[in-house]
Image (cartoon, rainbow, N blue to C red):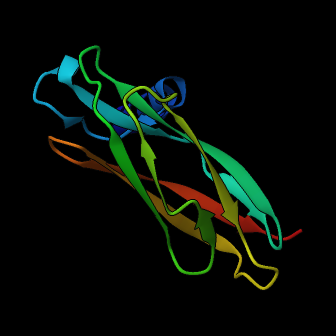
Amino acid sequence: MKTALTIVMTLALTAVFGCESPQGGGISRDEGFKIGVPTFTTQVKQGDRQTVTVSLHRGESFKRDVLLQIKATKGISVEPTQTLVKGSDAPEVQLQIAAPKDANLGEYRVSVKGTPATGEATSTEFKVKVVAP
C-alpha cells in the first residue's frame, strides 16, 4: 500500500512540476540550467506531425549560450536536430515530431542534450507514442 501511494504521489508531483533534466552549466543553482520537456507522452498519428515545446530553465546568473542536440529513436523524425539558444534568446524551442504513414504503432523516445558554451552538459528525454489515424 505504501509503495502504491508513493508511486501515485510521485506521478502527481511530476504532473504538477513537469519533467526536467539534471542541472547543467555551473555548480550552484543560479549558475546552471535545466531542460524542460513534455511531462506526458506526446501522441502523433501515423502520417502526421506534432509540435512540442522544449525549454531552458536558467538560473538567475546563467547567461551562456546552450547548444541543444535532439535525437529521436528510429521510426520517427524530429526537426530541428540541433539549435543554438543564445543567452539573450527566449528560452523555448519548438520541435516538430513526425511519424511516417507506415510507422510502427508504439512508443518512441526523443532525447535532448544541452551543452553550454562553458560548463557541464545535461540531457533528458521524453516519450512519443505513434497511434493509428
Q: Nearer the viewer, residue 93 or 1?
A: 93
How far across and down, in percent of the image, does residue 56 sit? 42, 33
Rendered view: 56 above or below 40: above
Rendered view: 109 above or below 4: below
How far across and down, in percent of the image, does residue 12 sit? 51, 28
Q: Nearer the viewer, residue 17 or 84?
A: 84
Asked which quadrant contains residue 10, the reply is: top left
Asked which quadrant contains residue 119, the reply is: top left
Outermost residue toward the top in this view: 60
Q: For the point 82% across and 80% down, which residue is it? A: 101
Q: Is residue 93 left or right of residue 65?
A: right
Asked which quadrant contains residue 63, the reply is: top left
Q: For the point 35% across and 32% down, which residue is it? A: 2
Q: Nearer the viewer, residue 37 or 24?
A: 24
Q: Is residue 59 left or right of residue 126?
A: left
Can residue 1 be seen in the rendering of this structure? no
Q: For the point 77% across and 61% down, which residue is it? A: 49
Outermost residue toward the left in this view: 27
Q: For the point 66% across and 63% down, which residue is it? A: 129
Outermost residue toward the bottom in this view: 102
How far across and down, in percent of the image, does residue 113 sit? 35, 54
Q: Nearer the viewer, residue 101 or 25?
A: 25
Quadrant holding the C terminus? bottom right
The mark tally for this picture is: 0
Can residue 116 be seen in the rendering of this structure? yes
Quadrant holding the N terminus? top left
